[in-house]
Image (cartoon, grey):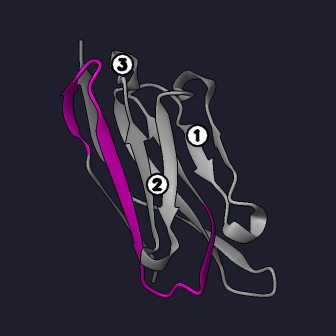
Amino acid sequence: QVQLVESGGGLVQAGGSLRLSCAASGSIFSINAMGWYRQAPGKQRELVAAITSTTSGGSTNYVDSVKGRFTISRDNAKNTVYLQMNSLKFEDTAVYYCSADIDYGLGYTLDYWGRGTQVTVSS
């Protein structure tokens, strides 16, 4: 059983910063891509940032609204992905979820999700 646990959320004023962490544990062989999603009440979940594995080039991508403000990174030895959020805006308020694509070999993969961490930005 694979588990993803997010941490680092909280309340911050506009213009401030937060750093989210997500650690994967359990029956893990290898992790391919990892990413962060967010969902505000009454709105659809959207992809915020993603990062590929080293063998895939270690590339990153971001939704346009956070480019230049958010940075995604990962520590493969700790099976952990991070999201550094700077210059936070009120519209960044949402529950943030991490995801991981687990590779079990021979092209067999499964996706897992964390339970989320609340980020609230006051104006």
- Residue 47 marker: 1
- Mark 1 to mark 3 CA distance (whole Å): 17 Å
For disc 3, the marked residue is 89
Closer mark to the observer between disc 2 and disc 3:
3
The span picked out in magenta is 9-33
Can you give x and y, in whole percent of width and height, for residue 18 in the image?
Answer: 29, 39
Residue 15 falls within the magenta-colored stretch: yes
- The answer to whether 8 appears left or right of 81 in the picture is left
Q: Residues within 10 Å of mark 2 (few under 14, many from 20)?
A: many
Can you give x and y, in whole percent of width and height, for residue 100 in the image?
Answer: 56, 64
Q: Are marks 2 and 1 in contact (CB under 8 Å)?
A: no
For disc 2, the marked residue is 98
Q: Which residue sits furthest right?
A: 106
Q: How many marks?
A: 3
Amino acid type at image mark 2: Cys
Sequence order check: which comes first, mark 2 or mark 1? 1
Q: Residues within 10 Å of mark 3 (few under 14, many from 20)?
A: some
Where, quadrant-wise, is the C terminus in this rendering? top left
- Per the image, label 2 sits on a secondary structure element best described as strand
Can you give x and y, in whole percent of width and height, for residue 105 in the image?
Answer: 74, 87
Q: Residues within 10 Å of mark 1 (few under 14, many from 20)?
A: some
- Per the image, label 3 sits on a secondary structure element best described as loop
Q: Quadrant of residue 56?
A: bottom right
- Per the image, label 1 sits on a secondary structure element best described as strand
Of residues 59 and 105, which is closer to you in this image?
Answer: 59
Residue at position x 39%, y 25% from top? 92
Q: Are marks 1 and 3 in contact (CB under 8 Å)?
A: no
- Mark 2 to mark 1 CA distance (whole Å): 10 Å
Q: Is residue 115 visible?
A: no
